[in-house]
Amino acid sequence: MTIDVESPAALPDAVGRSATGEWLRIEQRRIELFADVTEDHQWIHLDAERAAAGPFGATVAHGYLTLSLIPRLTHGLLRVGGVEMIVNYGLDRVRFVTPVAVGSRVRATTTVVSVEPSSSGTKAMMDVVVEIEGHERPAIVARSIALIVPAA
């Protein structure tokens, strides 16, 4: 399901609407690559044997890895006609609620909570919840802001 809006001017009509994306499995290889890029090689992410005996029972994805996947997890959930581009403007609130164990599947639900004009276009504020399959508590809750630039 997606949130389809005819134009940036119609974005206020999307407030309160939600859409949920597809599941994505978090594999150890992705965690290792993220560790290398960020130089965060903490054992809870990389040492399967030690992590199995640790607080989470397995290696876990970096919180920032899961956060960085929000664009992937929400891709296509908000479609707006008549735009040049939609870009990430930032995040207002982020909470890492539950660690994501290796092999888990995650997906995001996004809800448009407000829309405001900007000198560059329209800002859409969206609440994003990244859930973990089979878990009651989410991995992440965040307020994401997208800048929607109309076509020239």
Image: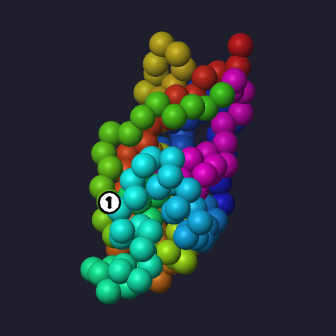
**92 or 67, which lies in front?**
67
In the picture provided, is 54 more to the left or to the right than 37? left
**92 or 14, which lies in front?**
92
Q: Is residue 31 visible?
A: yes
Q: Position of residue 30 (x, y in %)?
A: 57, 62
**88 or 65, which lies in front?**
65
**123 or 104, which lies in front?**
104
Where is the N terminus found, in terms of image quarters? Answer: bottom right
* Residue indicated by mark 1: 96
Where is the C terminus found, in terms of image quarters? Answer: top right
For label 1, the SS is strand
Q: Which residues are magenta?
A: 67-84
Q: Position of residue 124 (x, y in %)?
A: 48, 35
Q: Is residue 111 visible?
A: no
Q: Residue at x 43, y 27 (%)?
A: 116
Residue 63, above or below 122: below
Q: Residue at x 51, y 47 (%)?
A: 37
Q: Position of residue 20 (x, y in %)?
A: 57, 62
